Image (cartoon, rainbow, N blue to C red):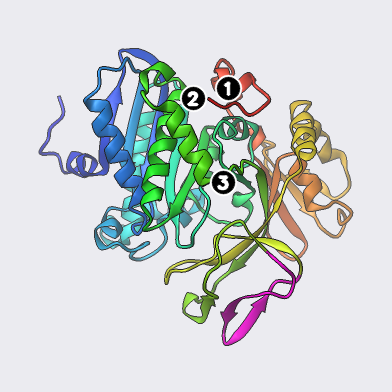
Amino acid sequence: MINTLDPKYEVKAKRIIGQIHGKQPGPILIFFGGIHGNEQAGVTALENVIKELEQSDHSFQGSLYAIKGNLPALVKGKRFLDKDLNRIWTTPEIQKIKARNPKGLLNEERQLLEILDLVQGILESGKGPFYFIDLHTTSSKTLPFITINDALINRRFSKLFPVPIILGIEEYLEGPLLSFINEKGYVSLGFESGQHTEDVAIKNSIAFTWLAMVYSGFLKKTDVKNIKGHYEQLQKSAENNSNFYEIKYRHALKDSMGFKMMEGFRSFEEVVEGTPIAIENDEFIEVEKDTILFMPLYQEQGEEGFFLIRKLPTWVLGLSAFLRRIRFGSLLQFLPGLSWANKEKESLLVNTKVASFFTKPFFHLLGYRNRVIDSTHFIMNNRELTAKNAMYRNTWWYRITTRKSL
């Protein structure tokens, strides 16, 4: 029996929007909303879906958890209070936080420990397969889109949804929640449903949540009265764009107060060479060649001014999947300038002076994404080496090779 006077339970009671448990074993879905406190749409969407599920007589298989992220920041409507909660999910940082006196922890550090405790409890509650989905919105106008760490299980599940998919985010952001979870080998998707204050962002998050429940097997398609409508909602909002893209540049900000995007830009907008897109420290930033703009910053808090992305051809995705299936990457250790970075053989250490002839796209094909160590070395991490493929092998979506629609 749960002691409702336990302060720890009180925290979880406020944090958990709702949880649904089926009579039959099955997938375990964990949805997050409000990891950034100024992104309310995901929380509202989950509240809507949970209410409908609780009032239905559906036959559920598995379990579903809907979780609020940064509670104090949500109350104040701010992205964060002390530090970005979605940039501190690294093993070294978590170890430091755990080792500190609890009384001296910052707001987001406390939030991390509470969420981590909750997630670990869920992981111990069943066999899975597990699906982690983090609902977000952006400060700029945008098509709805998915961001994933580039593992094949993430690609396969993501391509069921009729929205653009962005690869390579883990190479440019330090410490997102989903990167931490993906390192454990589980399917994990970030869904950006639209601009912060637009009603369509809530509608897109609701549609995405229903589709995820059906695709994972938590619900049968016949149990959802408007499943086709949810699919068409995303398809229309995405303007029939379901391409794969890769991030090729991140404009990092040391001081967001000295940065200002020019008005009117949106994600996925094609921008021609020489176009001024922002002002930083009283100087214009112009794009150096034709490109695609992604997540331009139109809010005070943030560590990225904008990203640039490129569309990935279908043949590149196919070649990449083939090379990973045959484990071609295991041969890299025998090439000059490359060696295993740890005894688990999950990362490569690259000496750039020796291995300068290898390009980043080559490593990307094999699932490796880099982290710079110093001027001559960087670490290449590979999500394929930790992916729990066996957990998902019996799912219907794992075996398909083309995008399916309803």
Secondary-structure class at tag 3? loop
Q: Sequence order check: which comes first, mark 3 or mark 2?
A: 2
Residue 217 rendering spot, x and y as whole percentages: 45, 20
Q: Sequence order check: which comes first, mark 1 or mark 3?
A: 3
The structure residue drawn at horizontal position 35% and vertical position 59%, both measured from the top left corner, is 38
Task: Say which mark, if any, is on residue 187.
Answer: none
Q: Amino acid at mark 3?
A: Glu
Residue 35 rendering spot, x and y as whole percentages: 38, 51
Residue 110 rendering spot, x and y as whole percentages: 31, 53
Q: Residues within 10 Å of mark 1 (few under 14, many from 20)?
A: many
The structure residue drawn at horizontal position 88% and vertical position 43%, both measured from the top left corner, is 335
According to the image, label 1 marks what residue?
Answer: 397
Dividing the picture into quarters, in which one does residue 330 lie? top right
Closer to the camera in the image, 136 or 176: 136
Secondary-structure class at tag 1? helix
Q: Amino acid at mark 1?
A: Trp
Residue 390 appears in view: yes
Q: Sequence order check: which comes first, mark 1 or mark 2?
A: 2
Q: Residues within 10 Å of mark 2 (few under 14, many from 20)?
A: some
Dividing the picture into quarters, in which one does residue 306 lie? bottom right
Closer to the camera in the image, 252 or 403: 403
Which residue is outermost to the top?
A: 24
Closer to the camera in the image, 12 or 344: 12
Residue 125 appears in view: no
Q: CA distance from mark 1 to mark 3?
A: 24 Å
The structure residue drawn at horizontal position 52% and vertical position 55%, both measured from the top left corner, is 142
Q: Amino acid at mark 2?
A: Tyr
Task: Say which mark, if any, is on residue 239.
Answer: 3
Q: What's drawn in magenta, residue-wise?
A: 271-288
Contact between marks 1 and 2 (CB within 8 A): the answer is yes
Residue 241 rendering spot, x and y as whole percentages: 61, 44
According to the image, label 2 marks what residue?
Answer: 215
